[in-house]
Image (spheres, rainbow, N blue to C red):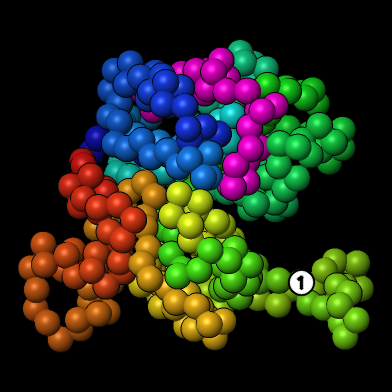
Amino acid sequence: MRQIVECVPNFSEGRDRQTIDAIAASIQSVTGVRLLGVEPDKDYHRCVVTFIGEPVAVAEAAFQATKTAAELIDMVVHFGEHPRLGATDVVPFIPVSGITMEECVAIAKTYGARVANELNIPVYLYEAAAVSPRRKNLADVRKGEYEGLQSKLADPAWMPDFGILVFNRKSGATITGARKFLIAYNVNLNTPDQKVAHEIALRIRESGRPKKDENGKTVKDENGESIKIPGTLKAVKAMGVLLERCNIAQVSINLVDYETTSIHEAFEEVKRQAATLGAEATGSEIVGLTPLQALMMAADFYAPQNVLSEQAKVALAIEKLGLSQLDPFDPEKKILEYQL
């Protein structure tokens, strides 16, 4: 069986089309790689790129894209809604077919070593490639963001996995690793109040929120660690953001295991929580690609007794989840299997 790896790098540029096109071109220049999607967002000031191919080609394309980003993106002047650590913020490698997670970890390590050695960018490993539990979660590695990176690098506990403790002012740092297929999913609210979206995110995300005492102070355990009140959804990361171009707030969600918490479960839970805050979930969007199965699961949830064709199920899921509220959802471009 042919080995196929997916790579979904996130770049800290969502507004300059020339830079975005140059990054995409650097990926397309590598033989054996197929570019599946380029999705910039001006409010997040971020671009999510998706491509697939065989391991060696994918690793090469990821490096060339990182090199181009290092040349064209200056983190000193970068500001956006989405957390980020560097110009090439995160580069995950995902097994698609004929390849194991362990082999994708090896790809991430090869890529990370090259970025550190040739581009002088510190690199951290996360998820399945993490060298310690505290580095497994992307949010933990990214904590402090670019603005706090220089101080982070001064802490021996945050020695990069590749590279040295030197702050690269222009490019920041890059995070890489291997993981399951992640669905980047945003739920739209009928309010521009970002605080409402943030409150919903705190309620649903698995990590929850810190427990507070009657005086509003964070409660800690015997080891001095904050005690957390877990959220309602497993395998979910979330935050509240303002989408200025539409003047609405969004609950920005990462479904790190869509078989544990599905798209429709996340959407329905955001709807439920929003209603308690006097708001309404009006639709949603998928950033990047989604497996067909995720939409089939949603269709079966919304029409459990109906025997529908695959095409009809996809259409039903798009309708019930409001996936075309902001931009048309094109199944041929957004569903992974239809691109392979």
Q: Residue at x 50, y 53 (%)?
A: 243
Quarter containing the N terminus: top left
Where are the magenta residues, as a range?
56-85
Quarter containing the C terminus: top left
Image position, residue 209 (x, y; %): 71, 71
Amino acid under disc 1: Pro
Q: Quadrant of residue 56?
A: top left
Residue 265 counted in the magenta span: no
Image position, residue 118 (x, y; %): 61, 13
Q: Quadrant of residue 198?
A: bottom right
Q: Residue at x 19, y 81 (%)?
A: 303
Q: Is residue 89 left or right of residue 337?
A: right
Q: Residue at x 21, y 50 (%)?
A: 330
Q: Is residue 127 left or right of residue 77?
A: left
Image position, residue 32 (x, y; %): 28, 23
Q: Is residue 195 left or right of residue 324?
A: right
Whether residue 254 is visible: no
- Residue under circle 1? 210
Disc 1 crowd rating (10 Å Cα; few below 14, some 14-19, many 20+) is some
Q: Secondary structure at mark 1?
A: strand
Image position, residue 144 (x, y; %): 75, 45
Q: How many marks?
A: 1
Q: Is residue 57 left or right of residue 243?
A: left
